[in-house]
Amino acid sequence: MLNPSPPGGAASAGILQNKVIGYYESWSARLNCHKVAPTNLPVDALTHVNFAFAYISPGSYEIVTMDGSTPASLFQDTANLKSIKQDLKVFVSVGGWTFSDNGTDTQPLYGESVSERLLPPLAVSETLKLL
């Protein structure tokens, strides 16, 4: 079913909201079997989409795809889902388990990005370019 209805129900407390979060695995666009593009997601039923994963490029601190096999166009394709459903919230998960593995070029990047004064604004501008 490509366009299921959002689940019913209501929050018992005023502070809570009903949320239906779709998790988009960026590597699913390059699978040989069951390939999934962001436009295949049931956006009518979702309140949020979480794009997994982006990486931070060592040296430039640019936000990039998790590997060379993942098309950079997936970032824009995912952000474009907001043109289908304007109130959809789109999030990007930066990292993943291999991002912080010991001995990798990416492992120290989170620490570096908060320890240097110029890097947090750079990370914010990279995120805004992405979305």
Image: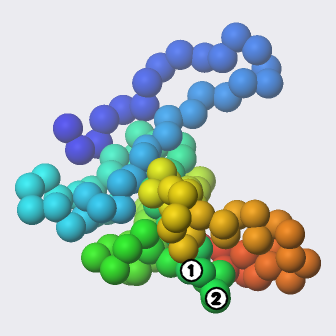
- According to the picture, the residue beneath numbered tag 1 turns out to be 57
Where is residue 19? Give x, y as percent: 57, 33
In terms of secondary structure, where does tag 2 sit?
Answer: loop
Rendered position, 17 above or below 25: above
In terms of secondary structure, where does tag 1 sit?
Answer: loop
Where is residue 55? Give x, y as percent: 53, 69
Pick the front one: 118 or 103:
103
Residue ranking furthest to the left:
33
CA neighbours of label 2 inside 10 A, class few (<14), some (14 to 19), many (20+): few
Residue ranking furthest to the top:
12
35 relative position to 42: left or right? left
- According to the picture, the residue beneath numbered tag 2 turns out to be 60
Rendered position, 6 above or below 130: above
Pick the front one: 32 or 48:
32
Circles 1 and 2 in contact, beta carbons < 8 Å: yes
Quarter of the figure with the C terminus: bottom right
Q: How many marks?
A: 2
Look at the image and tell me whether residue 96 can be seen. Answer: yes
- Displayed quadrant of residue 69: bottom left
Tell me the residue at 76%/14% (across/down): 13
- In the rendered structure, which amino acid carries the disc numbered 1? Ser
